Image: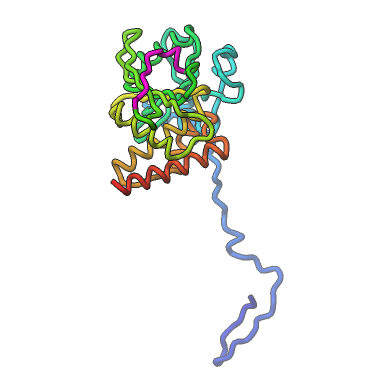
């Protein structure tokens, strides 16, 4: 735009000056980089101890979701992981005293650490570690999201199926190893599975277990991720609908993926999750 000057009611064009400097370009720019001293002060302020080392550790905890690590997964024996394609975050790994490694992760629901998504034990050795996990975390319910007996027989062989024609769940009370824990198994989980069937099984599960529970709900499947993640998603949204009357599926899926590796990592699992949520919302509106 050309510069003008107002004279006697007329605007006269000023001669162009090529060497004029904009005042904006001469302003001193503020740096966004912290000085070394300010950075050290920032790290020290992270803890009450004012220790630089403790501050670094605290800062790492705040940012670990942006840079996850899998050291314990890669150090563990291969037979303790069902699949080489399903990893385990170090930050949310369930640590059990007396157990070197078990493939399980903490996952938040409407409250912190509401769920444990775990790999189903398939032999006596794994079952022994699994029962230690249940006892240590003080689990209040167990869902086996697998239809095949190989993923539930090591937990208990006492699952009793309902007598209804469309009753696709079986229940048990686990009393082994000092536990007294209600457990439910999804017997119908085979491909393909409809959103209606998932909601039917989860509805029966919530009623049998008494959800929402005060303590952790342990959800197991063969790899501890795909089906377990879907069940945790629908259960969280069921709690949200009951408490707040609304759904927030994007927040829930993101939260589960941040805490449990390899959940919702295929189009089919995401599609089934969204359709299951739509069915859940339709049922909620009819109540």
Which residue occupies the foreground of this view, 144 or 236?
144
The prevailing secondary structure element of the residues shown in magenta is: loop
Span highlighted in magenta in the image = 152-163
Give percent across and percent down for residue 247: 38, 45
Residue 216 in picture, x, y percent from top left:
35, 24
Q: Position of residue 218 (x, y in %)?
A: 39, 23
In the image, residue 99 sits, relative to residue 222, either above or below, namely: above
Residue placed at 35% from the left, 47% from the top?
246
Q: Nearer the viewer, residue 52 or 177?
A: 177
The colour scheme used here is rainbow
Q: Which quadrant, please, contains the N terminus? A: bottom right
Q: Residue at x 37, y 46 (%)?
A: 281
Residue drawn at point x = 38 percent, y = 33 percent? 202
Q: For residue 159: magenta?
A: yes
Q: Which quadrant of the view contains residue 46?
A: top left
Q: Quadrant of residue 58?
A: top left
Q: Is residue 261 magenta?
A: no
- Nearest the eye: 35 or 90: 90
Residue 152 drawn above or below residue 211: above
Residue at (43, 36) in percent of width and height? 197
Is residue 37 in view from this perspective?
no
Residue that protrudes farthest toward the right in the picture:
18
Image position of 146 (left or right of 69): left
Q: Is residue 189 above or below residue 239?
A: above
């Amino acid at each position: 735009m050309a510069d003008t000057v107002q004279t006697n009611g007329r605007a006269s064009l000023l001669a162009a000056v090529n060497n004029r400097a904009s005042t904006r370009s001469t302003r001193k720019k503020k740096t966004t980089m912290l000085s070394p001293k300010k950075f050290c002060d920032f790290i020290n302020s992270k803890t009450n101890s004012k220790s630089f080392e403790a501050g670094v550790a605290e800062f790492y905890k705040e940012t670990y979701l942006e840079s996850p690590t899998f050291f314990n997964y890669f150090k563990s024996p291969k037979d303790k992981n069902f699949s080489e394609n399903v990893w385990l975050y170090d930050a949310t790994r369930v640590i059990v005293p007396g157990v070197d490694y078990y493939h399980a992760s903490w996952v938040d629901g409407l409250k912190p650490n509401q769920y444990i998504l775990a790999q189903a034990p398939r032999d006596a050795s794994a079952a022994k570690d699994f029962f230690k996990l249940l006892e240590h975390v003080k689990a209040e319910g167990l869902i086996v999201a697998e239809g095949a007996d190989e993923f539930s027989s090591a937990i208990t062989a006492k699952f009793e199926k309902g007598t209804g024609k469309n009753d696709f769940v079986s229940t048990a009370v686990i009393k082994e190893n000092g536990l007294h824990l209600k457990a439910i198994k999804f017997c119908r989980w085979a491909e393909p599975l409809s959103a209606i069937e998932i909601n039917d099984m989860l509805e029966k599960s919530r009623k049998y277990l008494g959800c929402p529970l005060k303590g952790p709900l342990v959800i197991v499947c063969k790899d501890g991720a795909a089906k377990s993640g879907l069940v945790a998603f629908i259960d969280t949204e069921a709690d949200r609908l009951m408490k707040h009357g609304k759904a927030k599926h994007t927040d829930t899926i993101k939260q589960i993926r941040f805490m449990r590796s390899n959940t919702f990592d295929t189009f089919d699992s995401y599609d089934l999750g969204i359709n299951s949520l739509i069915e859940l919302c339709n049922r909620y509106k009819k109540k």
